[in-house]
Amino acid sequence: MSSIGSVLGALAAPVAHVAVTYYLWRRLVRDTQLRGRARTIATAIMIVLMTTPPIAIAAMRVGAGWTSTHLAWIAFPWMGWAILAFLLFATRDAIRYGVRGVRRIARRPAVADAHDDARRQFLARVTGGAIATAAVGTSAFGAAVALGAHQVTTVEVPLAKLPPALDGFTIAQLSDLHIGMTIGRGFVEDVVAVTNAIGADLIVLTGDMVDGPVDTVGDRCAPLRDLRAPHGVFAVTGNHEYYSGADAWIAALEQLGLRFLRNQRVAIGRGDATFDLVGVDDWSGRGHAGHGMDLDAALRGRDPARASVILAHQPRQVRDIAARGLDLQLAGHTHGGQVWPWHYVVRLQQDGFLSGLDRVRDTWLFTSRGVGYWGPPVRLGATPEIVKIVLRAGTGDPKVLA
């Protein structure tokens, strides 16, 4: 049964991609009644664009990094535009069919010329052109956000068990860089520079650092070696590490100075004043030998009277974490929804968590919107962020400063 589910899951994305492209072809080519050479050229362009994403992904997997990157800058902007155009056309169609339904219920006849072919062609071309243009403008704006300046979000979190000597201890959180086909060395250098400028005591990376095999993408990660913090740079796996070869990536990133916490904990602090930093594998690691979230192993022998910060990629992991009485979870994974209205789908999939600060039992949860993106280089309603966590000793109110 699980193998059938895996096959269906693997087929879902390509089937959806083909269906969306066909839907757009119907609206932009068939409904506008393009004829002759114009119809042939438009159809050919859409077929080529439809096939470019899987070719780019396949090229990345076989190590053709240069080819993959250049194809990706065609494929993924197209995907971003297609998603937005699909939503706009679907909204228009829903309104149109809704009006028709109301007319039928009210038994009101359609306007006399509603089926006039010339009028229908004119309306299809005008609305189609307007929607295509709007999608271009919206996706361009989203690209400017995704590729623009890296915002620093400051969050003050009170921890009742934190020693007073550690009041003001700062943690810089990076999540979801997705270094790969369209996120390269220059992007990573900028992220590292902004992160180091925070001057944090500790830097943590909460998963999904990479997209692609080490042999193809490894050199793009090199600037991570320049991350600097007095108490070190720690990381945990995300689901995309497992898609890209987790063991190889853990070894490669540790050579750059990152220390992975694999269901482990370490003491962080100044002198006798310390707290526990815990890190667990992402849930998706369960299908990989030697991987998977194991809180029992991470917390074995821990003094529950000590303050604790846990790195766990997916915010929904907080249900298990809160049951163990840990103080603060730092997560990512959601991208804050990345492109509205997928926010609602992501929130549903993550048990109601999307971004920002939440509380489950006595555990604080901060979910970063992440600094990179996955797929289309577009962000709408989900500005990328680097997070500065300021730990406060006591039981006051938290503060989030965008």
Image: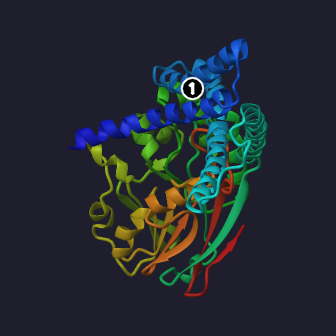
Q: Residue at x 54, y 60 (%)?
A: 344
Q: Residue at x 37, y 36 (%)?
A: 10
Q: Looking at the image, which is closer to me, 67 or 7?
A: 7
User: Residue 308 appears at what percent x and percent y?
Assistant: 45, 72
Q: Where is mark 1, residue-wise? A: 50
Q: Residue at x 31, y 36 (%)?
A: 7
Q: Residue at x 61, y 71 (%)?
A: 169
In this image, 143 relative to 313: left or right? right
Would you place residue 80 above or below residue 49 in this image?
below
- Looking at the rendering, in which quadrant would you find the C terminus? bottom right
Residue 100 visible in the shown view:
yes
User: Residue 25 appears at what percent x and percent y?
Assistant: 61, 29
Would you place residue 211 above or below residue 228 in this image?
above
Q: Residues within 10 Å of mark 1 (few under 14, many from 20)?
A: many
In this image, 135 relative to 240: left or right? right
Q: In the rendered structure, which amino acid carries the disc numbered 1?
A: Met
Please state the total of marks drawn on the protein image. 1
User: Residue 37 appears at what percent x and percent y?
Assistant: 71, 12
Query: The residue tagged with tag 1: helix, strand or loop?
Result: helix
Q: Which residue is the extreme one toward the top?
A: 37
Q: Looking at the image, which is closer to me, 82 or 275?
A: 82
Q: Looking at the image, which is closer to me, 122 or 229?
A: 122
Would you place residue 228 above or below residue 51 in this image?
below
Colour theme: rainbow
In this image, 318 relative to 379: left or right? left
Would you place residue 401 above or below residue 1 in this image?
below
- Looking at the rendering, in which quadrant would you find the N terminus? top left
User: Residue 249 appears at what percent x and percent y?
Assistant: 44, 37
Q: Looking at the image, which is closer to me, 277 or 346?
A: 346
